[in-house]
Amino acid sequence: MTTLPLFVALSACSGPNPLKGPPPLAADVRTLMSAILAEDNLVYLYSKTIDVHSGLAGELSPLLAEHHAHLSQLQARIIVPPGRHLRVHPTARPSVPATTQAAIAQIMTAERAAISAQLKRLAGATSSQAQLYASIAACEATHITLLNGQTIS
Amino acid sequence: MTNTQAPAADVAALQAALAAEHAAVYGYGVAGALMQGNDQDTAMSYWRSHQDARDTLTAMISRLGATPVAASAAYDLPFAVNDAASARRLVVYIEEGVTRAYLAIVAVSEASLRAFGALAMQEPADRATAWSGQTTAFPGMTPAALAPKTALATGTVPT
């Protein structure tokens, strides 16, 4: 039997060229990863704020727990190839203001930005992903309500 | 009147939200009567918000060429409501239901309706938090909806 040179044999294949490298990420995967990164940045901000202002732990810890839940849900929707790991590191590492009032204001600003970003992810997402983004955005809106002291007592 | 063809699923989602708003208007009437002071003032304000939302959905559905679902004459309450505390539980229950109804609109494929649903659900979620003093990680979502669906198509993942 005559063996073909490897490149000729491979060029006859109709599928992806294995020598060209992995395919690019699909758009909805890229969107999902941006959501994961944004959520990780919020987790970092909350964690750092609690570290600096321990007196805020009672107020912020439940909200931080919800952001962790968001992160877990988003990450669960990524299929990671065997042997690979999803690398998530916060990209925004702002310093925490010295006063608790300013620190809370910073968090509220971050939550507002997160809401806006989630709403921009809706178009093109699957129904399931869109609902997750919208629900997370609604949660973030309630964080602002709580932090603003807008509860009815 | 302009009649536009819209997918049946889109209209159904809007109708379900309208039904939820009808129930909210009714429920707030029951709850508000049992509240006093600031609570009652707040309930009155939120009652008007639900009426406005009801009118918005009614107009949207009509523009799509469908007949808006009508309110029921009365609604069965989910539990006994006979004092201020149970009235407060009722309004939280109402807002959670309205949140779920708007989240269902987010599932449609039409972009403007999806955006409408996502924005609209923030208000009832906020009101539920305002009444209860608590937040929830995934407003409007059921436990089944939180389980990951079909696998996403994957490319490379940064490692």
Image (cartoon, rainbow, N blue to C red):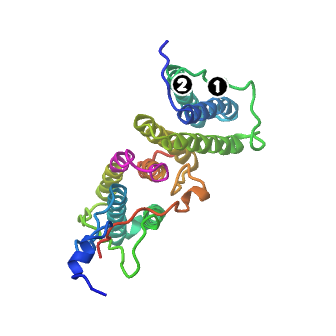
Q: Which mark is residue B69?
A: 1
- Read off the magenta span: A115-130
What chain letter is assigned to the residue under label 1?
B
Quadrant where the C terminus of chain A sits is top right
Q: Nearer the viewer, residue A55 or B130?
A: B130
Q: Is residue A106 above or below residue B58?
A: below
Q: Position of residue A16 (x, y in %)?
A: 30, 67
Mark 2–mark 1 Cα distance, whole angstroms, equals: 9 Å
Q: Amino acid at mark 1?
A: Val
Q: Amino acid at mark 2?
A: Ile
Q: Which residue is mark 2?
A: B61
Q: Nearer the viewer, residue B158 or A71?
A: B158
Q: Nearer the viewer, residue A101 or B45?
A: B45
Q: Is residue B91 above or below residue A4?
A: above
Q: Nearer the viewer, residue A15 or A151?
A: A15
Residue under the image location 75 percent in, 28 percent down = B74
In the rendered image, residue B149 lying in the magenta stretch gets the answer no
Q: Tag 1, which secondary structure?
A: loop
Labelled pair 2, 1 in contact (Cβ < 8 Å): yes
Report whether B142 appears left or right of B109.
right
Q: Is residue B151 above or below residue A28?
A: below
Callout 2: few (<14), some (14-19), or many (20+) C-alpha neighbours within 10 Å?
Answer: many
Q: Position of residue A115 (x, y in %)?
A: 37, 49
Please name the predominant secondary structure of the magenta segment in the image.
helix
Q: Position of residue B113 (x, y in %)?
A: 45, 35
Q: Which mark is residue B129?
A: none
Q: Position of residue A148 (x, y in %)?
A: 41, 48
In the rendered image, residue A120 lying in the magenta stretch gets the answer yes
What chain letter is assigned to the residue under label 2?
B
**Farthest residue toward the top?**
B1
